[in-house]
Image: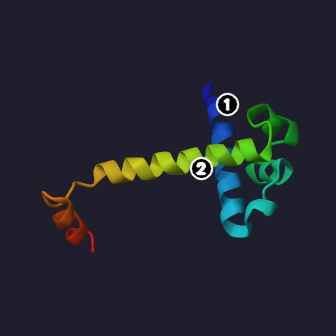
Amino acid sequence: LSPTQATTRRKLLDAARELAAADGYDAVTIRTVAAAAGVSAPTAYQYFTSKDHLLVDVLVDLVSDTTGSLSERPVAGKTPADRAAAST
């Protein structure tokens, strides 16, 4: 993707994430996401063919963010029991 395309895609993902977090699955439509991202619905459809395609990519981003933040945390304790005790 070009930098402009990557920015547009990110705006769509962020808007979908916010709408889903605030109002749930039914609140997310390509049209509402496009409006929240400041792009037209046809532009949004160029990036995501459906609402489910968009939401799957939102989930992929969430998993990636979570994996990244977990890998930044050092493991405490040498044994599983030690690690479990340290996390409480």
Q: Residue at x 62, y 48 (%)?
A: 58
Q: Nearer the viewer, residue 1 or 21?
A: 21
Quadrant of image for the N terminus: top right
Where's residue 68, x and y in %? 39, 47
> Does 46 appear above or below 62?
above
Q: Which residue is mark 2?
A: 59
Q: Is residue 62 left or right of residue 50?
A: left
Q: Residue at x 80, y 41 (%)?
A: 50
> Does 1 appear above or below 75?
above
Give residue 88's quadrant in the image: bottom left
Q: Nearer the viewer, residue 8 or 75?
A: 75
Q: Is residue 85 left or right of residue 61?
A: left
Q: Which residue is mark 1?
A: 5
Of the residues shown, which amino acid type is indicated by label 1?
Answer: Gln
> Does 46 appear above or below 78?
above
Numbered-mark total: 2
Extreme top residue here? 2
